[in-house]
Image (tube, rainbow, N blue to C red):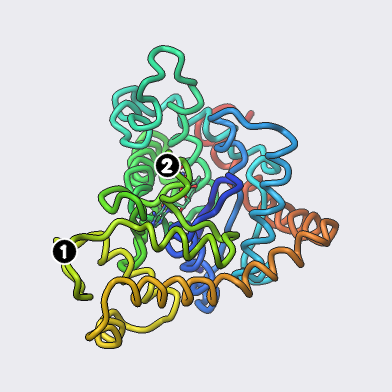
Amino acid sequence: MIRILTALQPSGILHIGNLFGAIEPMVRLQAEKSENLLFIVDYHAITVPQDPAQLRRNILFATATYLAVGIDPEKTILFQQSRISEHTELAWILNCLVHMGELERMTQYKDKARGKGESVSVGLFDYPVLMAADILLYDTNIVPVGEDQKQHVELARDLAERFNSRFGETFVIPQPQIRKEGARIMGLDDPEKKMSKSAPSEKNYISLMDDEATVLKKIKSAVTDSGSTISYEQNRPGLANLLTIYSLVTEKSIDQIVAEYEDKGYGDFKIGLAGAVSAYLTPIQEKINGFLKDERSLLAILDQGATRAKTIAAKKMELIREKIGVRL
Ligand code: ATP
Ligand code: LTN
């Protein structure tokens, strides 16, 4: 059986980039005959300071969001990373295989460490190793992620190969799966960089919880270019990004949307797009709020997911301990 796995940080704000790059592909994959795992990487989240009460709320919010967008906890093992201690245990073993240089090369680390000098946390540096453990522990075949995480999945592959050649066949070599459309939704205020919740301005992203007025305001202020016609071209990155979003929320092709706006300008296009985004988000928001009202059910779903994940992880960890020689 093919195993598909992905994870997201419980960072409070989830934006449409996260939704289309990472969560939606998981919803679609539920139709396949595979075993699917989706989890909330709370131990990755603490690589930057977190307020404990807020972190707790964010974990529940993330759970509610996955359910709201169509994750079915019967078809997908939905759980919290910190509940399965094997993740951090395997990370330690992989720490003893990974090279400093490999981690120093990681783009995300370089971006996040910038300006922090010597006070950058070891957790931030080690983040990709915990991620490799997340993936390898479950003999994962496919890892659907956004483009920015490809380098981390490649490290997981390298570590799996290194472990296998040193200790004998143990890990499956995982494949990253990057969706073509939506793999990289760009920032509204800066279409050269990916949409990101840690962007300096809120105008960078559309949060899943943004109301209609906010969506309209953000889209109206989105950077485009000095042209006036609506067309999809590489050298018009702002407009191309908006067209991609339009296509994702309506499931219409970009050509179809371009045809609809043939005789219209940016003003009409942006109003149309804002309406389409809100029409897409409103039912999701209602569902999220509904799930959040019933905390006990959310906790029960996470409990059930943890039990299922633990069974797989504990068995694999036994084999790993045996391979490295600590199991007597
Ligand atoms: P930050 O920018 O603060 O690091 P983020 O917004 O990139 O956070 P993550 O929690 O790092 O969010 O990513 C969660 C998932 O969403 C990952 O699989 C990532 O590849 C995907 N993702 C993030 N941003 C985008 C984007 N702009 N377009 C498509 N996918 C994205
Ligand atoms: N680093 C990823 C989250 C993540 C992940 C994983 C994704 C942690 N462990 C395992 C896929 C598989 C991120 O920030 N998006």
Q: Position of residue 69 (x, y in %)?
A: 59, 69
Quarter residue 73 falls in: bottom right
Which residue is the extreme one toward the top? 118
Above or below, comparing residue 61 to residue 82 in the picture? below
At label 1, the amino acid type is: Gln
At label 2, the amino acid type is: Ala
**Can you tell which mark lies on residue 234?**
1
Q: Nearer the viewer, residue 268 or 175?
A: 268
Please tell me which residue is depicted at 41% across the width and 74% down the height of the picture.
271
Please tell me which residue is depicted at 60% across the width and 36% down the height of the picture.
43
Please tell me which residue is depicted at 44% across the width and 58% down the height of the picture.
218
Side (left or right) of 191 relative to 85? left
Which residue does the numbered mark 2 point to in the structure image?
199
Q: Position of residue 212 (x, y in %)?
A: 56, 67
Please tell me which residue is depicted at 40% across the width and 31% down the height of the picture.
112
Is the residue marked by circle 1 packed among few (<14), some (14-19), or many (20+) residues within 10 Å? few
Q: Position of residue 193 (x, y in %)?
A: 30, 48
- Asked if ligand 1 lies within 8 A of label 2, the reply is yes
Above or below, comparing residue 282 to residue 191 in the picture? below
Q: Earlier in the sequence, mark 2 or mark 1?
A: 2
- Asked if ligand 1 lies within 8 A of label 1, the reply is no
User: Distance of mark 2 from mark 1, alpha carbons?
Assistant: 23 Å
